[in-house]
Image (cartoon, rainbow, N blue to C red):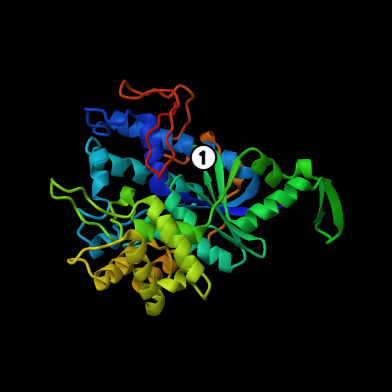
Amino acid sequence: MKRFTLIIDGHNFFFRSLWSCFRQGSKNKILSTQKDIDSYEKKMMIDFCSVVKNVSPIVNDIVFIRDSHSWRKDLLLEHEYKGNRKKTQDNIDMVGFGEAVNNFTETLVNFGIKVSQADRSEGDDLIYAWSNYLFNSGKSSLILSTDKDLNQLIKCVNDIHIIQYSPVSNKLYVSKESNDIIKSIRNRKEIQMENLFDELFTISIENDPFEKFVNGTDVEEVYPEEIRFAKIIGGDVSDNIYPVYFKRGDGETKSKGLGPKTVKKIYDTFKGKLDCDFDYHIYSNDEVMKMLCNIIYEIAKINDEEFTKRMLLENIKTNTRLVALTNESIPSDIIDNMIESIHEEIVKKSVIISKITRENIFAKSRFKEYKTNIQFDSSMMSGVKANDSNGSMNFIIG
């Protein structure tokens, strides 16, 4: 049976729990009282146990990823990179938020969960570093996040997988190679396994936990290189990253950019003209990038005397650094910081997944005891309404 290391996107998890606990867009400042902080901290522990229980049959280790101040904010002005997210956080008391997530993280550490954080490393960077490190060590990863930016990390070689699971939509994002294996498993009625004495024995596929898990989810096949290309050329609205060609309107004329249909046409044309493999190495090939600039100019019909191909090439290089999750795009000192964090955590003993229960987690927290009658104040709601588009949460879960 296939087993995975569960890599949890901490930033994504924090805000999923936050907006499932409080009304988003509330006029009142949330997490400004101790009652709010306590309720949010308890909600994170409950949510953590729930998501782990859901994937526990196929998981044998857990890594919880935490953000640091991003090097990308040093590359661009801080109000530009992800500057559009501040509006959704205006009603959050960030001191209270920090206290709650730090308390929660301390609880995970006390329980023995691997918690990884690296100086100037964004969560996405560290998720890339962990999944890549495990992949090169022959271990498969299950990334738990609703953030589709992470789709670019998905791959499978020699039955070693990096796949992504969205707990909100109950969807698995997989590569073509992983999906082919999943399809072959679904077509088999029984599998062979080895026991402790290296003797082969046969079990019904109906009893295989991985098969059961996959059958209980939606599976979507994704193409990482196309996803990465679309974000580099078309920009990323959720992170306030502009397309490689963008001209702001002046009130009389509309803003011009590269829409999804244009980017798809550029991608298809570019891929058809490539005489090498389409992977992240192409973005460091000057001749290939010059060809891409010509294709963009032609398809987008750019006729702008103030915008040169040299400017377009520089924009492609900038967006590649901001969007792509590769060793080539992330600064070497950040890579070193992340590897150091991985080495610190990887040597720690894996927790026993079955012991991750509400009672056991609460016992390691400052609350010491799990009570089934946890009360939420009037600024919280019950019910479910989810939006799983870019990792931006607009849902409420009781």
The residue lying at 42 percent from left, 53 percent from top is 149
Residue 98: horizontal and vertical position, in percent?
A: 29, 44
- Residue type at mark 1: give it: Pro
Kindly indicate the quadrant of the structure image that contains residue 36: top left
Question: In this view of the protein, can residue 126 be seen by the observer?
Answer: no
The residue lying at 45 percent from left, 21 percent from top is 373
Between residue 283 and residue 66, name the one nearer to us: 283
Between residue 44 and residue 284, name the one nearer to us: 284
Residue tagged 1: 167
Question: In this view of the protein, can residue 58 be seen by the observer?
Answer: yes
The residue lying at 22 percent from left, 31 percent from top is 29
Callout 1: few (<14), some (14-19), or many (20+) C-alpha neighbours within 10 Å? some
Position of residue 236 relative to residue 27, above or below, is: below
- 277 left or right, relative to 88: right
Kindly indicate the quadrant of the structure image that contains residue 395: top left
- 156 left or right, relative to 44: right
Total numbered labels: 1
Residue 369: horizontal and vertical position, in percent?
A: 47, 32
Between residue 1 and residue 293, name the one nearer to us: 293
- 359 left or right, relative to 87: right
Quadrant of image for the C terminus: top left
Residue 87: horizontal and vertical position, in percent?
A: 23, 40
